[in-house]
């Protein structure tokens, strides 16, 4: 019965009602049982995304109109001891960037935005924000628990609190996950470099997962798709890419993550000293080697960019990430890549005793002065939540830390009124200048590898005066504005709902009485609703660098012990192959493992961290890792040698379904902050 409680209300109720109409359920009592199951189930599984929060990861974010919007990903509920499974997040949430309650010290989280069952809950996708038209676009990502639907571009309208479907991409563009995505509102363009294609993101995918090499572009205004080339023909994923307003139109800067250069299932790290630059106007890629204190190779980290007031330096801040190899679970540190000097600067790192490495998190820079870091998967912590009072939100002040601190600490409470950036002394000491700019180091220590870059960094991107393509009102995402004036208001809807509930209760009572009368005359055996087993990805083969028996698996991001599968069978897929982007074949993967009864299986590791083996799992389904971010942790140094992930997961794709009215809007509980939660020394 426990497995069935993890299923979504929609799936279980529809299954039960289907059985009823097929004649498998008979008698008044059977009807009552089915209706009661559908009505009562929310009390078993309904969770509050604020009060019950423990951790989130693999989500996608964007900032529009002073709101940090958070969509999809995976989550754990608090307390972990009573909620041992990982769930997909079915809410669209947002942090109000004009607030910073005294308790959590982070922008208040809200969960009252619309998102109904027609919108997929994905991980590893991208949100392309459009400040001008007050909407974002959702592209890519992996699905859980069911085959992915046909790839579509989805859009959320902040003005009217509603979702729209913009149709399937064309020009050979297919869905990818965990690529390097960035939206540029000033230009009205969204980009995605590389990413994984697999049976978790593309319907009918029968081949092994593929790391793609192309650069996808979407134009907000024309709705056109372009499939450009990447830096080369090597498949890439799990790195970071940011936009900088240099050159005439702007540039994209990409680094880190994984690459698949050997056209087989081997992956290697993309070196952190190898920086790729894409000039948007000319559509040309360049590569430049960086120097300085180069970070250890990593993937699934996050990055955010800001720049000096005079744009004499552009500074990209990165945090965390997973490593490669068997000697590290990842990183708990902050580095800065300063351009155009192409110099890495180590800014902060936790002590070894307090380090909490984590990955699959998000970074969003606010007003070029602060960087909000949300969530993450914690491979080394098996028991704690990620700062529940602040909903897994942490803040880095990108400016010079406040004077008087016992030790250097860039972590701080969020400040809604901090709207300017001053270059910190750690950068000035390397590139020269002052807090307002004037950097004297305007080229790499070894010189530019292509003279074009020197020209591009001497230019500033011209301001683009985009105009809205529709009427823009003062409504916001948290409003209850309705684009259609003839629809029912909230009061009328509430009255209808109450009336329907009263009628249903009356019918249940009448049905029960009829049943008691019939039972006194003849016995009718009870037939309960069938229990549908919860989806479980089971144990899939995985992949790791340089070994032919390692494979990419979209169901689990962590290195886990390869279990004996001789007693099981792998279900083949027979759907036709979709159109593929250019790239390299990353692995040979088994995606669904079942036992002889046809049920998916899972054998959890009681310790949560399996021993090292030669198998690797992709980030689509993070582990049941019980990981945490301690707000008082110190951060630890890691060797740049490759590191290897650990852990495994139990995934139930049907997350607790929020309650919607007929307008599809969900109500949320708000909590009273208890105490201040932020990083301190």
Image: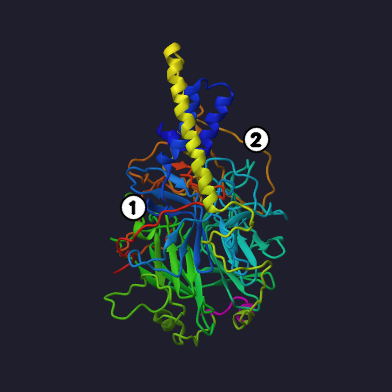
- Magenta-highlighted residues: 444-454
Q: Secondary structure at mark 1?
A: loop
Residue underneath mark 2: 574
Q: Residue 632, how many percent across, how many down?
A: 30, 64
Residue at (40% x, 53% y) in the render:
55
Indicate left or right for 581 with 396 as reference: right
Q: Which residue is mark 1?
A: 381
**Residue 162 image point, x, y percent:** 59, 56
Q: Depth check: 106 or 515 in front?
A: 515
Q: Please state if 186 lies on the left or on the right of 256 as rendered.
A: right
Q: Is residue 281 visible?
A: yes
Disc 1: CA contacts within 10 A as few (<14), some (14-19) or many (>=20)? many
* Quadrant where the image shows the N terminus: top left
Query: Up-down: is 408 above or below 534?
Result: below
> Which residue is at a point 69% across and 54% down the rendered structure image?
169
Q: Can residue 122 be spotted in the picture?
A: no
């Amino acid at each position: 019965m426990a497995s069935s409680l993890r299923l979504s209300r929609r799936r279980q109720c529809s299954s039960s009602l289907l059985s009823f109409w097929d004649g498998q359920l008979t008698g008044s009592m059977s009807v009552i049982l089915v209706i009661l199951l559908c009505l009562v189930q929310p009390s078993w599984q309904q969770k509050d995304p604020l009060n019950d929060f423990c951790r989130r990861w693999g989500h996608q974010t964007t900032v529009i109109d002073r709101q940090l919007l958070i969509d999809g990903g995976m989550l754990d509920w608090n307390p972990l001891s009573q909620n041992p499974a990982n769930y997909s997040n079915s809410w669209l949430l947002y942090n109000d960037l004009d607030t910073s309650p005294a308790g959590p010290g982070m922008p208040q989280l809200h969960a009252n935005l619309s998102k109904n069952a027609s919108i997929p809950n994905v991980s590893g996708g991208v949100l392309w924000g459009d400040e001008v038209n007050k909407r974002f676009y959702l592209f890519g990502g992996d699905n859980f628990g069911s085959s992915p639907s046909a790839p579509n571009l989805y859009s959320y309208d902040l003005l009217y609190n509603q979702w729209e479907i913009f149709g399937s991409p064309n020009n050979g563009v297919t869905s990818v996950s965990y690529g390097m995505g960035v939206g540029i509102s000033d230009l009205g363009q969204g980009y995605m470099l590389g990413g994984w294609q697999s049976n978790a993101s593309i319907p009918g995918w029968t081949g092994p997962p593929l790391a793609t090499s192309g650069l996808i572009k979407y134009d907000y205004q024309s709705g056109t798709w372009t499939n450009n080339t990447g830096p080369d023909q090597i498949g890439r994923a799990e790195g970071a890419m940011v936009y900088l307003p240099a050159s005439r139109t702007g540039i994209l800067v990409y680094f880190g993550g994984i690459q698949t250069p050997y056209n087989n299932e081997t992956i290697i790290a993309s070196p952190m000293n190898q920086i790729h630059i894409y000039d948007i106007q000319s559509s040309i890629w360049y590569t430049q080697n960086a120097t300085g204190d180069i970070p250890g190779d990593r993937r699934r980290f996050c990055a955010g960019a800001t720049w000096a007031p005079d744009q004499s330096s552009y500074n990209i801040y990165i945090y965390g990430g997973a490593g490669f190899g068997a000697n590290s679970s990842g990183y708990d540190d902050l580095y800065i890549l300063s351009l155009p000097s192409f110099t890495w600067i180590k800014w902060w790192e936790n002590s070894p005793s307090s380090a909490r490495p984590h990955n699959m998190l998000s970074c969003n820079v606010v007003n070029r002065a602060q960087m909000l870091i949300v969530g993450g998967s914690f491979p080394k912590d098996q028991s704690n939540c990620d700062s529940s009072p602040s909903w897994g939100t942490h803040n880095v002040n990108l400016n010079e830390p406040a004077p008087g601190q016992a030790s250097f600490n860039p972590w701080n409470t969020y400040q809604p009124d901090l709207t300017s950036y001053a270059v910190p002394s750690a950068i000035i000491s390397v590139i020269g200048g002052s807090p307002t700019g004037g950097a004297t180091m305007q080229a790499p220590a070894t010189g530019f590898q292509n003279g074009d870059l020197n020209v591009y960094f001497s230019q500033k991107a011209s301001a683009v005066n985009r105009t809205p393509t529709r009427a823009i009102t003062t409504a916001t995402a948290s409003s209850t504005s309705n684009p259609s004036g003839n629809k029912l208001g909230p009061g009328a809807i509430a009255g209808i709902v109450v009336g329907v509930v009263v009628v249903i209760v009356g019918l249940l009572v009448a049905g029960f009485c009829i049943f008691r009368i019939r039972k006194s005359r003849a016995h009718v055996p009870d037939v309960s609703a069938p229990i549908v087993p919860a989806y479980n990805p089971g144990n899939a083969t995985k992949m790791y660098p340089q070994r032919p028996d390692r494979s990419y698996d979209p169901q689990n991001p962590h290195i886990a012990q390869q279990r004996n599968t001789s007693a099981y069978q792998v279900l083949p897929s027979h759907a036709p192959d979709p159109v593929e982007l250019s790239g390299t074949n990353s692995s040979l993967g088994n995606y669904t493992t079942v036992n002889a009864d046809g049920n998916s299986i899972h054998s959890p590791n009681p310790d949560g961290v399996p021993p090292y083996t030669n198998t690797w799992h992709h980030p689509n389904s993070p582990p049941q890792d019980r990981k945490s971010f301690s707000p008082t942790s110190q951060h630890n140094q890691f060797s740049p040698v490759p590191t290897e992930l650990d852990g495994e997961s139990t995934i139930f794709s049907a997350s607790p379904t929020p309650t919607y009215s007929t307008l599809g809007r969900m109500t949320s509980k708000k909590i009273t902050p208890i105490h201040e939660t932020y990083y301190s020394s």
